[in-house]
Amino acid sequence: MDTLSAALRITLVFYLITSGSSTCLFGCSCTDDNSGRSLLCMETSMGQIPEGIPDNFTKIRIENCHLTELPRRSFSQVSTLEFLWLNFNEVTLMNIKSLEGLANLTELRLQGNKLASVPWTAFQDTPKLKILDLKRNRLDVLPEHALRHLTALTYLDLSFNQLSVISKEVFINWPLYQTAEKAWGKEGLVSNVVLGLHDNPWLCDCRLKGFVEFIRAVSPPIILMNSYLACSGPASKADKFFHEIQLKTCMKPAASAPETNITLLLGANATLTCLVKARPGPTIHWMYGLKIIKGFAATETHIDEETITSQLVIPSLNLADRGLYTCIANNFIGNSSVNITLNITSSNSSAPLPPPVPMLSSDENANIDVRIAKQTVYGITLEWYAETDNPTETWFTIHFGKYDSPKKEMIYIGPGINSYSVSDLLPVTKYEVCVTLKNHPPREGQCIVFVTGSDISEMEQRERLIHIVVIVCAMVLSVPAGMYACTTDARFGCVERCVDLWKRRRMHGENLQGMERQGTFDSLQAASDEALCRDSEEKPKNGRKSENKGKGGSAAHLY
């Protein structure tokens, strides 16, 4: 009997031990071996790091489970964790504290995810990390101090990413590299450090010079998985290996011009030429009267790897085209510019014509119709139609700024363009935008005045309120379908009353959705000023004169 009792006790103890250790997540499997307990989750649709993971695992492998992020303290309860494999998920975001509590972690594999960046300071929480696999992600930047906290690393795989330019300082400043390089020459006491950097789209210009030299000179304890790193660009170096190319030091742009003072006949075609030397290749744009020229795409010709010629062609010169043109070249080191003066003479005189005041084109009485073609949460898109004698040669000027500002920003628009977008607008601000012939002051009917509303966090609500406010104001002013939002001059005071009333209702918490009487501009019905501008709060009506009397313009209200 004593023997049977002892056997039952042993069986019960064994059951309790095994049942306690067999706790596992649904859809996953758990195993035990000499190195500890393992959790394996493969091809499940969990979508996020499961909660309640037991704290006695040393290995966790969650692959093809559609994980999208590593939140704060993702596995902090599993303090014994040494191996973490999260390969082939859809991780795009890694919290800076996602590895908190994993002081014993030695191996982290994130191969085949969608990481465009990594919070490298997160590795402060993993001082024992030896293996880091980031292969086949979307990393395009490697900060200079990215490896600062990876002091125990022996394997780093960054292959098959989107890295194009990195500095050699990334590795020179790596504490492990500095320590290993010193100790290796003595007794070979340090382990090799394996790096995977191949199959990235390396851009082999002057910015990569230091890194290319580092790769050429790399030697144990640093070992490359694949030492044949190849260039993806520029075209002259595409598909060449690092050891086959010579790169020069980067150079600030130096802009010059063969001619800086040009005189041409009225009606002739002008070609302004700018020569730029720079490493790496610069971006070049032209300015006229301190404003960037839009509408004419300057042609660029590469003479050699560091010299570019930019030519701006101005067809059929008229008096408004004379003046100072500036060619500006930029790269990441700095910028340079050169000025070119363009003079115009008449056919019967060799002397340049005096500059007109103001500089107006020949189409002084041209009619320009302006309308709002598109409204977004952030701005508007203008469209205009102009009746001119020479539409293929007519330039326009956009005057844009706050309504009460005496000075407006001016943007020159070349022939053939009849739209312009205004974005990044401030909330609760009144703006005015006008379209005129080049260098003409705004005239009646060429301006649109609009007011932005207050900021709301929910995108859908913001878009809905924009639509409502515009429709209400359009009803006030009887706007035909597809035409200008709230076009008026003498009735502008009515529009302001409409907006003031709307703001008061917002302050009292009224539901603006009730104000929407029709769904689209196509369904608007004409109505009188008296009926539609009536204050719904039945306040005494006070005669109010338009603040815009005598000033041409249109008004559109955005929320």
Image (spheres, rainbow, N blue to C red):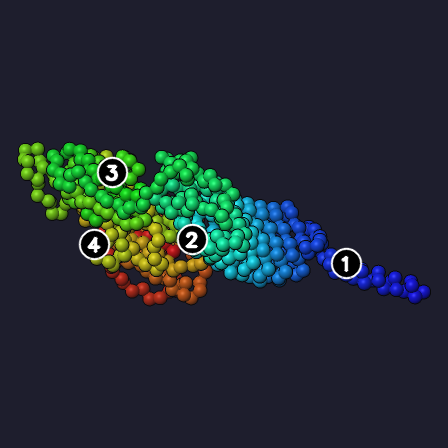
Where residue 515 appears, as percent x and y from the top left, is 42, 56
First-in-chain label (4 vs 2): 2
Front one among 412 and 329? 329
Which residue bears the numbered disc 3? Answer: 310
Foreground mark, 3 or 2? 2
- In percent of the image, x 42 and y 35: which residue is there? 239
Q: Are marks 4 and 3 in contact (CB under 8 Å)?
A: no
**To which residue does mark 1 refer?**
18
Badge 4 or badge 3: first in the primary sequence: 3
Left or right of residue 265: residue 338: right
The quarter of the image holding the N terminus is bottom right
Q: Looking at the image, tell me whether mark 3 or mark 1 is earlier in sequence order.
A: 1
Q: Could you tell which of marks 1 and 4 lies nearer the N-terminus? A: 1
What numbered label is drawn on residue 172? 2
The residue lying at 44 percent from left, 64 percent from top is 509
Give amino acid for label 1. Thr
Mark 3, secondary structure of its residue? strand
Closer to the eye: label 2 or 1: 2
